[in-house]
Amino acid sequence: MPLSHKVFVSAAEVARKAGVSRSAVSRAFTPGASISGETRQRVMQAAEELGYHVNHLARGLMRNESGIVCLIVSDVATPYRSALLRELTQQLQTAGKVAMLVNTDRSDGSVDRALSQAIRYRADASIILSGLPDKSITQLCLRNGQRLVLINRDDDQPGPLRINLDDHEAAGRVVTAFVRAGCTRLAFASSEAGTPSLMAREAGFIAAAKSHGLDVIVERYGWTGYEAGKVVAHRLLTRTQRPDAVFCATDLLACGFMDAARHQFSISIPEQLCVVGFDDIEQSSWSSYQLTTFAQPVAAIAQEAVTWLANGSSGELDGRSVKLHADLIWRDSVRGG
Amino acid sequence: MPLSHKVFVSAAEVARKAGVSRSAVSRAFTPGASISGETRQRVMQAAEELGYHVNHLARGLMRNESGIVCLIVSDVATPYRSALLRELTQQLQTAGKVAMLVNTDRSDGSVDRALSQAIRYRADASIILSGLPDKSITQLCLRNGQRLVLINRDDDQPGPLRINLDDHEAAGRVVTAFVRAGCTRLAFASSEAGTPSLMAREAGFIAAAKSHGLDVIVERYGWTGYEAGKVVAHRLLTRTQRPDAVFCATDLLACGFMDAARHQFSISIPEQLCVVGFDDIEQSSWSSYQLTTFAQPVAAIAQEAVTWLANGSSGELDGRSVKLHADLIWRDSVRGG
DNA sequence: ACTAGACGTGCACGCGATTGCAAATTATAC
DNA sequence: GTATAATTTGCAATCGCGTGCACGTCTAGT
């Protein structure tokens, strides 16, 4: 690949034009460096005229700090994921970092490959929104001074920052709401993905129901999304003892569930059936759904992650576990809000 | 910031361990380089044991080719944008590139700042999904050997690759569909964003309607999204001469419009009112909407962009304009599909 | 006037990799 | 066995930048 044209303008050229040494140019662009106001002016002007921009690749090489944060995520196009992504990129930017986006699929070494990519680019940190890395590669990251953030992926490894919600407790609040609405035949709708948050919601729901003397029908299908919600609805609503309250592990599931219940089974919500979701995606507030659900505190999650990253590594193992609260947003899919 | 621990392992250490020179290590990781199978084996093993990864920052410095592609986008969390984003990152990855995500807002120099970021990291290219850069910075990019892709942002500048849809012609097909459904009072619902694609759809719709001897009521409000759709619906449906067919510039608008029409005005779709959208976001296929709409060929768009990037700059001004076709997806929001 | 200090500047080296060139090794031909 | 070609390997320069160190200049203190 032949270098196309005139390539980039380097600090040396700026230095020549400004009549100073190359170090002066460097210092002009380094906040807090020892340089006089006058020469800084001269350098800045020359830089402006030449269209010079500091090469962050080279700077990262020297400083051993690239400013890159790697976002590892599957299903970017999903409403909740994309909302979190937006928040993260935004806050990273204002913190002076830059986001590198790596997609993963459901294949096995997918997250590991993504992390290798992050290491190759000497990312200061990686934030994992979905999937879990192998223990060995986690070690590799930490050993290389790369910091790790795990979101909604409970894991007991020391080192990374682990951000989670109070899924278990939140699920308990759903039972309370259902009981108050006079519901008795509870169901839990989920997928077969088996992620920690899904499991926690399920376990919390079942436990709280039991403490009320209620059983729970659990139905899982496929892959957490709208279609799975429809399938699960079909299974749940063709039972002889049809449930009168269902907690959907995810808003996307809930949307599919509600659509199936209304349009295929002509069930009216919340009169005949109460529904609660989780995530508070934008669609949940749409008139067609008005879903009562838990709000993922995306802004708080992002903030937690970014501030942790901004404060340089304090110790050897500065990993900690943060548990955030999910607010219940009352809308019209449960009686007696 | 003290370098935390043992930092990264360099090629020199691998070379020492494998008993070869630094260059050999470099060559071992460069496909097509002149190196014997045996030494490559030795190097690879040593690298594996030490946990070595090529430093792409340094590589990019030498090769003058970072492998980074900058994705500049506002409203990442919007369904259409995130779908395109998913497709782009995926295809970039398989092409051996890595995506750097930069958020922009609606403020003036936002895209320019994003492009500066791209230049600082010596991105091989930038793909702009929303907003338009200043001419001057476009020049700066091209002069620096940075390639540019503009998606759905018609612009007459030479140099960048410009990918657009046949918005104007597509809008004409909507009129045909409405006329065939027996509609006579046409309306166009849009936002005040005034992007080229929005304008093209509007112009195309009006032109085609005129050729059928029909007038079009145009209503625009705020910012392309669900809420705007509701507001526009309110304005349009409280008129004395209520329209019986409306083309929404965007699916998100259409969803808001349909919800308002049904739940606030008790209008049944498509019996009393036909609706067509644009984008084919996932929600359009949900049972609650079943929206007839145009499919954004996201995969084709991404492919077009990535293959253009993969083929190194052929000439000085290799920019070209690509016009892609948007298929009309028939669902239930228009009579007589 | 002499010295101490503060401040700004330049030199030169290092960061981690690629690559042209020439030497060294191996393979092939006669 | 030698001459020649083909391949492999190491040396050293380079990419653009940051920064420790030494030097020069200017101000202030006694």
Image (cartoon, coloured by chain):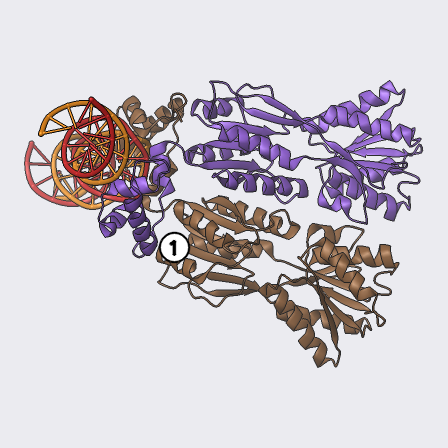
Chain colours: A purple, B brown, C orange, D red
Residue on which the image places disc 1: B312
As displayed, is residue A277 above or below residue B264? above
Choose between B47 and A201: the one closer to the eye. A201
Q: Amino acid at mark 1?
A: Gly
Please state the chain letter of the residue tagged with numbered disc 1 in the rendered image.
Answer: B
- Give me the residue at 29% from left, 27% from top: B12
**On the rendered structure, is A170 left or right of A132?**
right
Choose between B333 and A183: the one closer to the eye. A183
x, y (%) of residue B264?
A: 86, 56
x, y (%) of residue B3?
A: 38, 24
Q: Quadrant of the N terminus of chain B?
A: top left
As displayed, is residue B169 above or below residue A22? below
**On the rendered structure, is B46 left or right of A283?**
left
* Location of residue B15 (image quadrant): top left
x, y (%) of residue C14?
A: 26, 29
x, y (%) of residue A111?
A: 54, 32
Regarding residue B102, the answer to whether it shows in the image is: yes
- Give me the residue at 63% from left, 63% from top: B326
Regarding residue B325, the answer to whether it shows in the image is: no
